Structure formats: C-alpha cells, structure tokens
Image: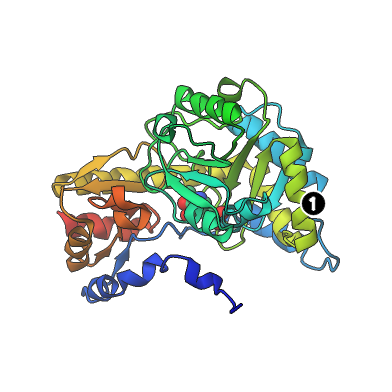
Amino acid sequence: MPRISVAKTLPDFPWDSLASAKEKAAAHPDGIVNLSVGTPVDPVAPVIQEALSSVAAVPGYPTTHGTDALREATAASLGRRYGMTGVDPAAILPVIGTKEAIAWLPSLLGLGADDLVVIPEVAYPTYEVGALLAGARVLRADGTAQLGPEKPALIFVNSPSNPTGKVLGVEHLRKVVEFARERGAIVASDECYLGLTWEAEAVSILDPRVCGGDHTGLIAIHSLSKTSNLASYRAGFLAGDPALIAELLEVRKHAGMMMPTPIQAAMAAALTDDDQEKAQRERYRERREVLLAAVRAAGFTVDDSEAGLYLWATRGEECRATVDWFAERGILVAPGDFYGPRGQKHVRIALTASDERIEAAAARLS
Ligand SMILES: Cc1ncc(COP(=O)(O)O)c(C=O)c1O
C-alpha cells in the first residue's frame, strides 16, 4: 500500500490565499495595517517575564500534568475570574498552546472513521483539521436541531466565537450539554476569548448554570495567548471531566506533549496576577471602540462581535471583494470564507494591532 500523505488530507493553509491582498496593502505609503490575524502586539507583562526567567536554569524534564502550583493557580483563577467553581486542580491539563490541543483532541480521544465531529457553521479552522487528522466525519451546525438523529462523538462549541464574536447564552449551552449527554457525545468548549467580553456576559461550559455542577463529558479549552499576550510562549490548558482529563494526560505523557518548565512558571504567574489581564482587556476595549466606529462610518454592518478580538463586518458583497477594498487602503483583513461557507459575505477585522496602527486604519477608513 502506498503511503498516504497526511498533509494531502488537509485543506490548503488559508492564509496562503491572501498573498496578493497583502502585497497590495503593503504598498500603502504609510505601511500596512495588518488586521488579518489575531496575534498579540503588546509586550508580555514584567511579572510574567520574571517568573519565566526565575526557572531558566532548571535542567530536568517537566511533568506533563504541570506543577501543583500551576494547577492550583489555574483552578483558583477560573473561580475568581469566571465564577467556575468546583474545578479540581487534578482535572486541569496544561497544553502547549490550545491550537495543538484542539488539532489533536479527536485523535487523542480515540475518534476515527466511524465518528462524527460537530463544529460551528463559521469556525476557527483547527476544529475541522482536528477531525480530519483523526479521519472522522465533520458536520457544521450551530444548534442541536440541525443534527437530526446523528450521534456525534464530539461537539466543539466556541463562545465567544472566533471569527464572529458571538456569545452563546446559558440556555443555549445548557441545551448543548443536555443533547450531548442524551447522545453520548463529549463537548469541547473553546473558551479562549472568555475574558474578553464587551457587550454580553460569556459563560463557561463548566459554569454551574450550564452543567449543573457536573463536568462529566465536558472539556473547557483555555488559552493565555490573547488574555495575557502569551501567544509566543504557547500556554493554555484543558479543564473539566476528571476521567477524560486523566485519559488525555496518559496519552500526552506517552507522546511527550509536555509544557516546558519556564512556561509553566510564567503561566502560573499570569493566572495569579489579574492586573495585567485587566490592563490588556482595557487596551483592546479602546481599540475596539475606535475601529468599530470607523468601520461602521465606512458603511459596513458589524454583526455579532459582542466579545472577542474581532469585528465581523459585511456590506453584503463577496468577502474577497471586501478584502480587496481594505487592501487598497493599506489594511489587511481576513475573508470570512476562511471560516466556512456561511462566512462568505463577511470579513474578520482583528483588534490586535498597536494603538498607532488602529488609529491609522481608522483614518484610512474615513
Ligand atoms: C478560537 C480559537 N481557539 C484557539 C486558538 C489557538 O490559540 P493558542 O494556540 O494560541 O492557544 C485561537 C487562536 O487564534 C482561536 O481563535
């Protein structure tokens, strides 16, 4: 049997298709304003950098489960920041950024060709990639009513959403949990923007109002990339069902998927210090206000976008035409079709640029 290339089973890397728009935007005399990716631009807080360097001389292997201090700091932060009480520190698992955790989750859970993975209609592309890596079937659906008699093995939800910024309410999430429990599905709730809300309260899948205090079958996915500017460090964690976390820990131990010691220390510091997290949220709040007003004044409708780091904007035309329109003004935005067919008439505009670049974008839109 000839070898099957895994790379060939995956979609084209979406950002490759933006090359010509990027070139056009870069030709602007005052330089490009790149709002196409959600990468942080503000420096890592000193308290986090110091924690990182405090263990820079430690030579031994880290543990896959993370230090007790890290898991205790994580559980405490979930209670303090989001009212997620009752998370046992043992049921927390550090991951090397959540992208890898999402991409490998279906595989590590043992899913395969007979299994169905449900992802949002308009979604962060890695959910689909994860399902494809496991060889599982993928279905895009935003509500349980769309699933008919299907019995999914895994349901991804993402609130606040990338790319739309939509927040799912307690009722919606509770229905997903009830449906999953009836049909034997696991729910993986990507909550990487939970700390970045503007116009709506976002709740975790582990919130007692959603799950009734029972974490069975539920995995919350949290990243520090956006809330603490730690995208470069690669820091996130899974929390939830103790049995599932123990199972994933076992596999990740065998596979060497362990967070480096300096990152564990940095992550514990970030989860202990709420001031740097609040300060970052306020930076994004201000940038959002400037950009939202400018995008609306330029004639766009901004849908959802109640939370998270993006404006989900449309003026009813195909997204690639809108991408071109922005590129002519030296601004690069992401086409909605990156995130699924239902995103075809929207673009995603990131708030992750310096104040100076956000002001430049607003001036160019006026
Ligand atoms: C919805 C969502 N999940 C997960 C990630 C991955 O974040 P990281 O791998 O930096 O933790 C991102 C990054 O943009 C995201 O938007």
Q: Quadrant of the N terminus?
A: bottom right
Classify 175 as above or below 57. Answer: above
Single out the residue that lies furthest toward the front.
1
Q: Residue at x 42, y 68 (%)?
A: 13
**Visible residue check, residue 236:** yes
Q: Is residue 22 shown left or right of residue 46? A: left
- Mark 1 burial class by Cα count in 10 Å: few <14, some 14-19, many 20+: some
Above or below, comparing residue 155 to residue 126 in the picture: above
Q: Which residue is drawn at 74% across and 59% down?
A: 258
Taking depth in this image into account, of 360 and 20 the one nearest to the observer is 20
Residue of label 1: 250
What element does badge 1 sit on? helix
- Residue 103 percent location from the top left of the image: 57, 57
**Residue plotted at (64% across, 55% down):** 107
Residue 225 lies, in percent from the top left, at 55, 54
Amino acid type indicated by mark 1: Glu
**Is 14 placed left or right of 50 in the picture?**
left
Q: Where is residue 329 in the image (x, y as percent from the top left)?
A: 18, 65
In the image, residue 270 lies at what x, y percent?
A: 64, 48
List the single residue furthest toward the right.
Answer: 60
